[in-house]
C-alpha cells in the first residue's frame, strides 16, 4: 500500500499531473501549482498498482555488489564486470575490466569513469548537433539530478545527467536534441516538438525507453 505521507509533490506551471519514480526510489507527483492536495492523493491512489510495479522494477538498479561477473550498462549494452590485475577501468569485447586494487572503492571509481565517458560522448554529440541544428549553447555542465535527464536555462546553459551514457546512443542523442531545441524554443509547444522530430523522427520511442528503463541507469 502506498504511503501518501512519503509522496513527494512538485508543483509546476502545468495543467496535468504525472507520476515519476526517481532513481532514489522516491515517488514524485508533478502537479499544477493550485491543484488541491486531495485531488493529488486521489490520483496517487488510482495509480497505486502502477506505482507498486515501478517500485519493484526500480530496485533492479540499486543492488550492485561490485562482484566479478556482475552486469553494467554502457550505451545500452550490458558488460560483465571482470575484476583482475588491470591498471585501469576499460571496456574490452563484452567485459568491463576493473582493477582488483580499486575494489574497496568500486562505486566511486566506476562513477568517475562513467562521468568521464559521459562528458566526452555527450560533448561530441552536442558539437555535432548544434552545427546540424544551426544553434548555439553558452555553457555545458553535468550532474546527477534525479528528476531530469537534461535542462536548458533561459540563457542557453545546458546540463545533462551523466547517467545517460548508460542508455542506448539513440536515447542519449534524443536528450541532446531535446535540450538543443530549447535554445530556440523555450517551451514544449507544437513548434518545439516539430523541431525535435525534424532531427529525431523516432523521438517518442526514446521517451518511452527512458520512462520504462530510466531507473536501471545506476552504478
Image (tube, rainbow, N blue to C red):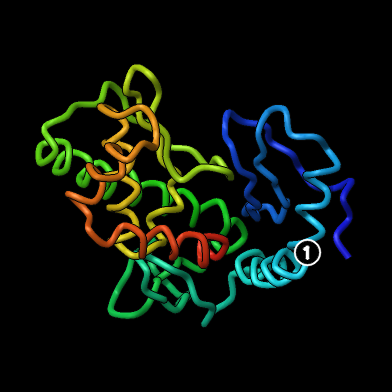
Residue 179 screen position, x and y as percent: 33, 38
Side of 213 where 127 appears, left or right? left
Residue 44 screen position, x and y as percent: 77, 54
Nearer to us in this view, 40 or 109: 40
Extreme residue in the top direction: 155
Side of 156 where 15 appears, left or right? right
Question: Quarter of the image containing the N terminus?
Answer: bottom right
Nearer to us in this view, 69 or 183: 183
Residue 204, quarter of picture? bottom left
Residue 15 screen position, x and y as percent: 59, 37
Question: Quarter of the image containing the C terminus?
Answer: bottom right
**Count of numbered labels shown in the rendering:** 1
> Is residue 82 visible in this depiction of the protein?
yes
Name the residue carrying label 1. Answer: 48
Q: Residue at x 51, y 68 (%)?
A: 100
Side of 178 where 63 appears, left or right? right
- SS state under label 1: helix
> Is residue 88 visible in this depiction of the protein?
no
Q: Residue at x 80, y 35 (%)?
A: 36
Q: From the viewer's perspective, is residue 114 above or below residue 160?
A: below
Nearer to us in this view, 100 or 187: 187
Q: Residue at x 37, y 69 (%)?
A: 76
Residue 25 screen position, x and y as percent: 71, 56
Amino acid at each position: 500500500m502506498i504511503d501518501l505521507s512519503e509522496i513527494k509533490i512538485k508543483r509546476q506551471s502545468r495543467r496535468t499531473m504525472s507520476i515519476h519514480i526517481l532513481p532514489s526510489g522516491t515517488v514524485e507527483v508533478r502537479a499544477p501549482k493550485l491543484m488541491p492536495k486531495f485531488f493529488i492523493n486521489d490520483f496517487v491512489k488510482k495509480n497505486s498498482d502502477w506505482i507498486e510495479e515501478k517500485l519493484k522494477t526500480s530496485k533492479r538498479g540499486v543492488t550492485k555488489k561490485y562482484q566479478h561477473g556482475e552486469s553494467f550498462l554502457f550505451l545500452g549494452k550490458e558488460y560483465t564486470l571482470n575484476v583482475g590485475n588491470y591498471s585501469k577501468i576499460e571496456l574490452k569485447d563484452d567485459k568491463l575490466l576493473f582493477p582488483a586494487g580499486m575494489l574497496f572503492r568500486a562505486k566511486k571509481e566506476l562513477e568517475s569513469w562513467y562521468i568521464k565517458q559521459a562528458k566526452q560522448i555527450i560533448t561530441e554529440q552536442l558539437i555535432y548537433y548544434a552545427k546540424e541544428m544551426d544553434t548555439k549553447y553558452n555553457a555545458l555542465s553535468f550532474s546527477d539530478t534525479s528528476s531530469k535527464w537534461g535542462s536548458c536555462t533561459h540563457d542557453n546553459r545546458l546540463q545533462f545527467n551523466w547517467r545517460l551514457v548508460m542508455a542506448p546512443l539513440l536515447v542519449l542523442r534524443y536528450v541532446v536534441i531535446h535540450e538543443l531545441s530549447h535554445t530556440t524554443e523555450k517551451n514544449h509547444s507544437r513548434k518545439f516538438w516539430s523541431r525535435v522530430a525534424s532531427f529525431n523522427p523516432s523521438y517518442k520511442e526514446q521517451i518511452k525507453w527512458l520512462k520504462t528503463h530510466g531507473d536501471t541507469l545506476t552504478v
